[in-house]
Image: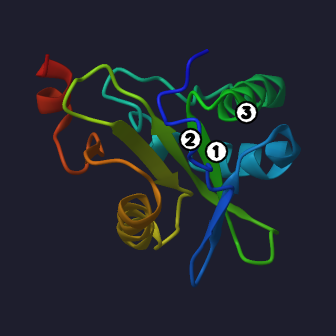
Amino acid sequence: MVSWLDKDFDIPLQMQAADYRLRMLTVNDLVKDYDAVMSSQLELQGVFGPQSQWPIADMTMEQDLIDLGWHQKEFQNRSSFAYTMMSLDEVTCLGCVYIYPTYKADVDAQVFMWVRSGSELDQQLYADVQQWLTNTWPFHSVVYPGRNVTWPDWLDQD
């Protein structure tokens, strides 16, 4: 697959923050990721859009493993980038960040993120990711559907 980023751009493998670390999501994160996803299942509905059913209430660990493997392969192929949000001691998955290309001509990337239920880090994660993408990534225009643009506006754009 042809990358949507310049081949000379070194994809960051992690981003360190004061209270957490973002790093490449892999199949090795299965148990912690599954716990975070399923303990936050209702709150995560719609994170990828109003029609998204992910994660379904009866999602199995095997289904999550398939998702993680897919994300890991896409990262390796430079076609999209999924980061797990881990506590600094790597004990707890606190959420995830996904950086995807978009078909919209005036937007370089669309970014989705979530934090596990009960976390108070959502606004901090959003601010940190915005700064990280501005300072580290080669994007000129990033959209955070459901955050800096409403879902109806994002989905109605040509």
SS for dot 1 = helix
Q: Is residue 104 left or right of residue 116?
A: left
State the image coordinates of residue 82 (x, y, percent, origin top left).
61, 42
Is the residue under label 1 in contact with that under label 2 (CB below 8 Å)?
A: yes
Give whichever of 137, 41 is nearer the camera.
137
What's under tag 2, amino acid-wise? Gln
**Image point 40% across, 50% down: which residue?**
138
**Image point 64% across, 44% down: which residue?**
37
Rendered view: 118 above or below 154 = below
In the drawing, what numbered circle is on residue 76? 3
Q: Which of marks 3 and 2 is nearer the N terminus?
A: 2
Q: In this view, does 50 lie to the left or right of 8?
A: left
Which of the 4 quarters of the picture holds residue 150?
A: top left
Which of the 4 quarters of the picture holds residue 22?
A: bottom right
Give whichever of 129, 112 is nearer the camera.
129
Q: Mark 1 points at which residue?
A: 37
Q: Mark 2 points at which residue?
A: 41
Please tell me whether mark 3 or mark 1 is closer to you in this view.
Answer: 3
**Residue at the limit of the structure toward the bottom, as seen here:** 18
What's under tag 1, amino acid-wise? Val
Is the residue under label 2 in contact with that under label 3 (CB below 8 Å)?
A: no
SS for dot 2 = helix
**Residue at the limit of the structure toward the front, as seen here:** 8
State the image coordinates of residue 32 (x, y, percent, origin top left).
79, 53
What's under tag 3, amino acid-wise? Gln
**Image point 62% across, 50% down: which residue?**
10
State the image coordinates of residue 133 (x, y, percent, origin top left).
41, 58
**Residue at the limit of the structure toward the right, as seen here:** 28
Where the C terminus falls, by quadrant?
A: top left
